[in-house]
Amino acid sequence: MKAWVGVTDWSWYEFLANQPRLEEVNFWQPGGSRAFTTIGPGELFLFKLRRPHDVIAGGGFFAHSALLPLGLAWESFGTGNGAASLADMKRLIDRYRSSEGTSDPNYTIGCVVLVQPFFLPRSRWIPAPPDWKPNIVQGKTYDLTTEPGLSIFEQVRDALTAPSGEPSWPVLLRDLPADPRERYGEPVLVRPRLGQGTFRVLVTDAYDRKCALSSEKVLPVLEAAHIRPYVDEGPHRVDNGILLRSDLHILFDRGYLTVTPGHRVEVSRRIHEEFDNGREYHALHGQDLRLPHRQECHPSREFLSWHNDNVYRG
């Protein structure tokens, strides 16, 4: 069981620390050359502020890593990117990309998606680990079952507990084990609760960035559709999502098309009856949905049945 202590930009941290409780944040990496694979989903990612602070000041739980165009990262996470606007976000990242030499304003960045983020008050900031070296540029991995990782974990738990003994982040502390050694051999600390942005990125990558019906690959027009909408108690889970071209997403949400529990596409005759058109859409009727490679990412039969019964207009 591991944690990553990541070197953190002060402006990014300060902006997010002053926001109301956040579901998710994007710990962006300016280079955009490779995905972050050092820790797995549910493992702890801690924010180590640069000098002169030189402390651990918060963290979150790793959910996913992706390489995304700057604009899509902003659309997915908004102010969860640590800036008030896309322009501010770009200015912040450009400070680290001055030597990249790209003229593309929508350049690719690395996105490390963290859920259940927490930002500690100054009085509870944690000193940098004793073995931390000043020349560490990105971060360092720690085993939480041995020193000094175990002490880091214990300090984080203590920092999340109010002086009264009550947890400052009750949901977070409920999920964390009292001792990470109790979960030795288990792959995660917590089961990440996904937010809307994380859901979008996970579904996009699960479907290899192609529409599940049309195989369209132009990212700006691809959207992660909830099978059972979030407002109707549908969760932000990959198996409750399908990647669709924007027009197909609209038709799916409005009940003009659906996907059966057997992953077969059905298109309602109402498209033709109401709009006297729709040949392109009716051509999709009866085709098989293009499924993600990973079985656990396939659309849930339960959610598909719900959509068939409650949304599809037949």
Image: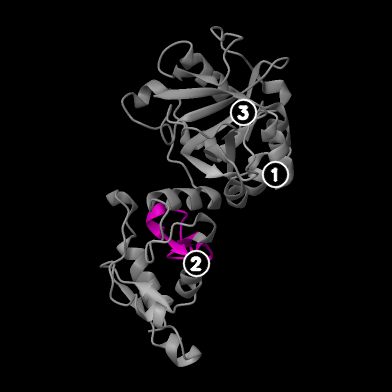
Please say whether residue 237 is one of the residues in the magenta stretch.
yes
User: Is tag 3's residue or tag 2's residue first in the polypeptide sequence?
Assistant: 3
Residue 58 badge = 3
Determine the residue positioned at 44% across, 57% down: 217
Quadrant housing residue 159: top right
Q: Position of residue 214 (x, y in %)?
A: 39, 66
Task: Identify the residue position indicated by label 2 in the image.
Answer: 232
Crowding at mark 1 (Cα within 10 Å: few <14, some 14-19, many 20+) = few
Q: Is residue 237 above or below residue 6?
A: below
Crowding at mark 3 (Cα within 10 Å: few <14, some 14-19, many 20+) = many
Q: Nearer the viewer, residue 286 or 255?
A: 286
Task: Identify the residue position indicated by label 1 in the image.
Answer: 20
Q: Judge from the rendering whether residue 274 lies leftward or rightward of residue 86; answer left or right.
A: left
Measured Cα–Cα span from mark 1 to mark 2? 24 Å
Q: Nearer the viewer, residue 306 or 288?
A: 288
Q: Position of residue 43 (x, y in %)?
A: 45, 31
Q: Judge from the rendering whether residue 94 lies leftward or rightward of residue 240; answer left or right.
A: right
Asked if marks 3 and 1 touch (Cβ < 8 Å), the reply is no
Q: Nearer the viewer, residue 11 or 130?
A: 11
Question: Number of numbered discs present?
Answer: 3
Asked if marks 1 and 2 touch (Cβ < 8 Å), the reply is no
User: Is tag 3's residue or tag 1's residue first in the polypeptide sequence?
Assistant: 1
Instruction: Give the magenta part as a residue range.
Output: 223-245
- Residue type for callout 2: Asp
Determine the residue positioned at 67% across, 27% down: 9
- Residue type for callout 1: Pro
Crowding at mark 2 (Cα within 10 Å: few <14, some 14-19, many 20+) = few
- Residue type for callout 3: Gly
